[in-house]
Image: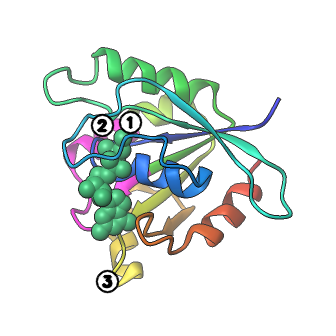
Amino acid sequence: MLPLVALVGRPNVGKSTLFNALTRTRDALVHDEPGVTRDRHYGVCRPEGQRPFAVVDTGGIAGIDEGLAGATARQARAAAEEADLVLFVVDGREGASALDDEILAWLRKTARPTLLVVNKTDGLDVRAAINDFARYGIRDAIGVSSAHRQGIDELLAEVFARL
Ligand code: GDP
Ligand code: MG
């Protein structure tokens, strides 16, 4: 079985865009409307010269009216719990939010190895964008732009170091 990497985060941070960048497909639904990805969505990342790994794109936790107890959040939780590594995806443009705080709290409970992925850093000072999440105490943080495929190779190196 392939190692499994789960993409977890609130709606609209770019999980599906990152999924597509990793799997080089347009399979995942990318949408401007938060909460579009409803179900768990699996793909395979086959980086050149590296071992492949499976990726699961989860629905945004706390779809507007469901909250953390809703069906989408349950799916994301289940995905995180079975993953070898969780990529906690956040939005570098908007910075840390209350919902990110909540997701972090339950991610800690799952106790899965977690890498913080600060997305949408295109045109930003990447270090400053990451710094906004410093209080999360996740030492392993990386800035990427999934839409522009920036930082994806660095992210892959970090992923492989943990699988
Ligand atoms: P999800 O709800 O977390 O799956 O987020 P999506 O992948 O559907 O993306 C939400 C929105 O953010 C879409 O409009 C994307 O085009 C946009 N987006 C995703 N990644 C990036 C990025 O790296 N940079 C910028 N500027 N926009 C992005
Ligand atoms: Mg999505």
Q: Is residue 96 above or below residue 130?
A: above
- Residue at x 48% of width, y 48% of height: 26
Tell me residue 154's x, y (percent): 63, 71
- Indicate left or right for 70 with 161 as reference: left
- Indicate left or right for 22 with 61 as reference: right
- Residue at x 44% of width, y 20% of height: 75
Question: What is the crowding at mark 2: few (fewer than 14 residues within 10 Å), some, or many (at least 20)?
Answer: some
* Label 2 residue SS: helix
Q: Amino acid at mark 1?
A: Ala
Location of the N terminus by quadrant is top right
Does residue 159 appear anywhere in the picture? yes
Which is more N-terminal, label 2 or label 3?
A: 2
Q: Give, as a single range, the part of the protein colored magenta.
A: 89-104
* Label ID, residue 105: 1
The verdict on residue 100 being magenta is yes
Q: Which residue is mark 2?
A: 102
Tell me residue 144's x, y (percent): 47, 69
Quadrant of the rendered image holding ligand 2: top left
Check mark 3 vs ligand 1: CB closer than 8 Å? yes or no: yes
Q: Amino acid at mark 3?
A: Gly
